[in-house]
Image (cartoon, helix red, strand yellow):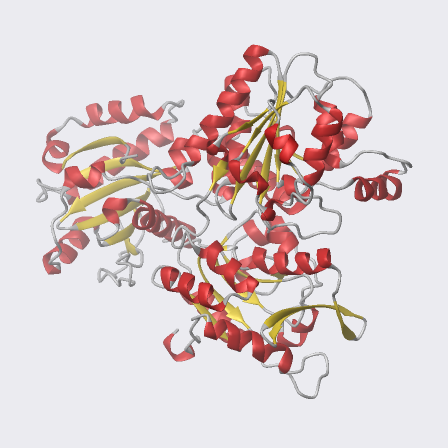
Amino acid sequence: MGVKAYYSALVAEFLTQNENDILAVLTMEHHHTLEESQREAWLRQIEILRQSLVDRHASKIYLEFFIPRMGKRVDALLLTEGIAFVIEFKVGAKTYDKYALDQAEDYALDLKNFHEGSHNVPIIPVLVATAALAAGNSEPIFSADQVACPLKVNANGLGELLEEITTKSNYTPIQIERWESTGYRPTPTIIEAARVLYQGHSVEDISRSDAGALNLQETAAGVDEIVSRARQQNFKAICFVTGVPGSGKTLAGLNIATQRSLEYHDEHAVFLSGNDPLVNVLRTALNRDKAKRKGEKNAREVEQFIQNIRHFRDEALKSQDPTSEKVVVFDESQRAWTRDQLAKFMEQKRGRANFQHSEPEFLIGVMNRHKDWCVIVCLIGGGQEINTGEAGMSEWIEALSNHFPDWQCFVSPQIALPEYGLQKTVESFLASPRTHSDRRLHLAVSMRSFRAEKLSDFVAHVLDGDLDAAKSAYQSIQTNYPIYLTRNLADARKWLKARARGTERYGIVASSGAQRLRPEGIYIKAKVDPACWFLNSSEDVRSSSHLEEVASEFDVQGLELDWAAVGWDGDFYYSNAHWNTRSFKGTKWQSVKDANRKLYLKNAYRVILTRARQGMVIFVPWGNAADDTRLPVFYDGTYQFLRACGIPDLNPDAI
């Protein structure tokens, strides 16, 4: 996907074109009711830009330049003298507000990270607060990636600032046609994606398009094709979409639910998840976003679009009628409950004894009430079961095999791999005429860590204790994805604050079993509010970026940070050439022998080690020889193994 803007022209043309003609182009591309305040803002921006660009005829100007990942637009983008200036106007503003500076920096970082033509171009974000006093900071300070700290200027100072910077610069001229044609390859966080999709954008607008990644659009198109066939031919179908951690499974699911609902109003597609924090965060984000756009037409209730699986189940128990939903997307289907776990929950929490269905069997049964057609889309992550009673894929296959012989099944070829939880023989199911293998239903490349697509491989090798494979994998990611070790939590906090720019999110995560990190300042038993932790600004003490509250694997699964500090405790520690699993009970550690509980502990670390999109620091404390619950032996082996994998020590003097 190349660049998009409402208006673009060489500056020579921009300077001579009638301002009303420019305004007409902007208005035509706007596709929304044009408020008078927006019209006046555009006219003022055009006026300031014309005064500031009189000597830049060969340069190119873009107005309302589209930032796909964020679903937003930069007021103006200027390519001149080998530099890209990202210019954000605040018409009438008398102060240089932090949120506006962060906004300009976010746009510049997005351009640098996700637009191929800008990878090697110096980018300078500029905030124009038109009525503010002169700021006097015209000297750009560049980071290593050639993105400068935001500059501040008023309406009268923009031309002088541009002149002062470009006079001193000696950068390679930008080949404008080539720059425009190179791909924009955004990898949004799931929160960003939900916001943009909910506004009616397509997944093509916010996802990568490079041929090297196993294409998210291809998976979305494959599922859409199956849903359309089921609708047209009146059959019931279930799709199993697999993917590595961070590959975009949830994004694919949100896209399916939004696009089907937008295109077919009678389908009432719904996105279901048993992940309370994910549902809470996405609902809060969409409701906050909707509140900012109060006048938006045809806004659907967020609560109908994103639901907790338990609430969906409770409603289905009230009546035997078919649901209004014809398409149900079940996120993290590997976490569906077994029959025993669901029966226990229904008796203890719902007062319903002798419940005889597993969660997969009950959900399929609810959708089976439809007489004509329906589709269930199961999104499945490999190696992510982290709770007692989570069934993996086995219960889904058993339910289909024993109770629903008429359903058509569409499966990813990877479905039979061990990490997808098929604990029983499924050869007969996979060989059945009603089971169709479709390679499009697997997402093989992590998009969460856009700087390191092989991060999940590295983490897997580390947790498997495979030193040679881990060292090799680390070498493939170390250039673009920084990982450091530290034994000082204060240094980890300092590193996070130094790395993050704009509104990039950072925070501290640890496993739910990391109870003896409390003396170090990580109290995992204190519950976080996921919506506040992931959405609120760093000034809020509940925010991840305030670095006080710590989130566990249960809080962060399915969600992302830009930068993370991972606290590593003695619940999963390396000694005698293998990983040891333990649980802290009362006043002492107890060995974990049960195979399932050992797997959950391992997967807890898999989750927290794959949350950061851009880099992480791993904190392994020294321990305390005077405290039997924090002996150095519980930590030194882990530190030494991670160091042997290639992860360097964090140098506090270089932060």
Quarter of the image holding residue 47?
top left
* Quadrant that contains the C terminus: bottom left
Q: What residue lies at 85% left-to-right and 44% top-to-bottom?
A: 344
> Is residue 638 left or right of 150 when viewed as pictured?
right
Count up the numbered dots. 0
Regarding residue 646, the answer to whether it shows in the image is yes
The picture places residue 145, in percent across and down from the top left corner, at: 29, 59
Q: Quadrant of residue 500?
A: bottom left
Residue 492: image location, x then y, percent: 50, 71
Q: Residue at x 70, y 12 (%)?
A: 371
Q: Is residue 315 above or below residue 414?
A: above
Is residue 349 rendered to the left or right of residue 331?
right
Position in image of residue 648 (x %, y %): 42, 73
Left or right, 531 with reference to 349: left
Closer to the camera, 289 or 560?
A: 560
Rendered view: 105 above or below 298 = below
Question: Could you tell me which residue is drawn at 75 percent across and 51 percent down?
Answer: 388
Q: Is residue 620 above or below residue 186?
A: below
Tell which of 548 and 551 is nearer to you: 551
Between residue 159 and residue 347, name the one nearer to us: 347
Q: Closest to the observer: 151 or 260?
A: 260
**Residue 306 visible (yes or no):** no
Quarter of the picture holding the N terminus: top left
Estimate the x, y position of residue 559 in percent, counting from the top left. 55, 48
Residue at the (12%, 50%) spot, across then down = 81
* 616 sits to left or right of 21: right
